[in-house]
Amino acid sequence: MPKALPIVVGVDGSEPSLRAVDWAADEAAVRGLPLRLVYASLWERYEGTSLAADIVKPSEQVLAEDIVDSAARRARRRQPDLDVSVDVLPEEPEYALVRESRSASALVTGTRGRSGLAEALLGSVSLTVAGHAQCPMIIVRGNHDNQARTATHGRVVVGVGEKPAGSAAVRFAFEEARRRGVPVDVVRAWRCPAHESTDHPLMSGEPARLHEQQAVEALETALKDVPDDVEAHRRVVEGPTRAVLVDASRDADLLIVGAKRRPGHYGLQLGRVAHGVLHHSACPVVVVPEHA
């Protein structure tokens, strides 16, 4: 039997990363998966060459090992039966975590690291990794306890995109709702473009009804394969998709969105909606790769 892929957490000693460890420990316990804690930094660029022949470890490496060991103790206190491993990698955290995503069930980070950015904004490492990760990536946002095992609001939310058929994000949402034992709100936002509106009394409302109907049909397509043991609620909402999903996140334990992955494309593959909710969601966000 192949070894179960771990849930990987990027840690750096900051409070947001420790909350991510708590969340990931709960999630790993719920899924019955091992937990892997990773610290990545290019300390060798600054200390490694001058200390290459020295017996003493570079101070940054000592700090990194202390950080991951402390995080591991924290995870084991929270989930005593959890299989926890740690690693310290002498490389850029963005590259290290994207590589880790290729052999992980999920990747978890906090909202920011030690960069001093405001809590309301997403740190550059998490944003970059979210645009390239090959597995679902969870960014632990929000001010509540962020426990995967305990439902604060008792629901998860998933946004339905332009191609709802076979959506990996929707499948992930069904699986997560089943594991948590909560309903899933499947949301599709719609808007009537300004150029299609008209003031003619005989035509008023027609363009809007057309776009609303298309949103309803997209939801039906997304929900064709909903499991019998998952309670799914349909929500068609008028408004910008990003604003609709951020609003839904205020009463959710988890917000799930998809992000296209285009082979051979090396730029940030995130999309405006995912980018927006990562910065403004009131709850943890999952970015699920939608491979072409």
Image: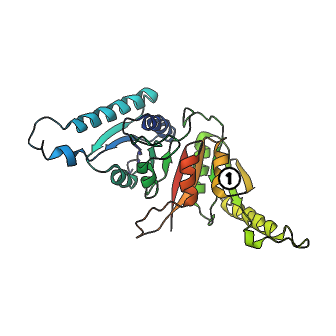
How busy is the neighbourhood of tag 1: few (under 14 within 10 Å), some, or many (20 plus)? some
Q: Which residue is mark 1?
A: 244
**SS for tag 1?**
helix
Viewer can see residue 230: no
Residue at left offset 56%, top offset 38%: 142
Instruction: Decide which of 223, 185 is in the foreground and name it.
Output: 185
On screen, 135 above or below 210? above
Q: In which quarter of the view is residue 167 placed?
A: bottom right
Q: Amino acid at mark 1?
A: Val
On screen, 236 above or below 35? below
Q: Position of residue 45 (x, y in %)?
A: 21, 49
Judge from the rendering whether residue 220 lies leftward or rightward of residue 91; answer left or right.
Answer: right
Instruction: Decide which of 79, 281 is in the foreground and name it.
Output: 281
Instruction: Decide which of 58, 117 is in the foreground and name it.
Output: 117
Residue at left offset 18%, top offset 43%: 47
Judge from the rendering whether residue 267 lies leftward or rightward of residue 239; answer left or right.
Answer: left
Q: Position of residue 145 (x, y in %)?
A: 55, 32
Judge from the rendering whether residue 252 lies leftward or rightward of residue 63; answer left or right.
Answer: right
Q: In which quarter of the view is residue 199 placed?
A: bottom right
Q: Position of residue 2 (x, y in %)?
A: 38, 51
Residue at left offset 39%, top offset 56%: 102
Viewer can see residue 73: yes
On screen, 106 above or below 32? below
Instruction: Decide which of 136, 204 is in the foreground and name it.
Output: 204
Residue at left offset 70%, top offset 58%: 189
Q: In which quarter of the view is residue 95 placed?
A: bottom left
Q: How many marks?
A: 1
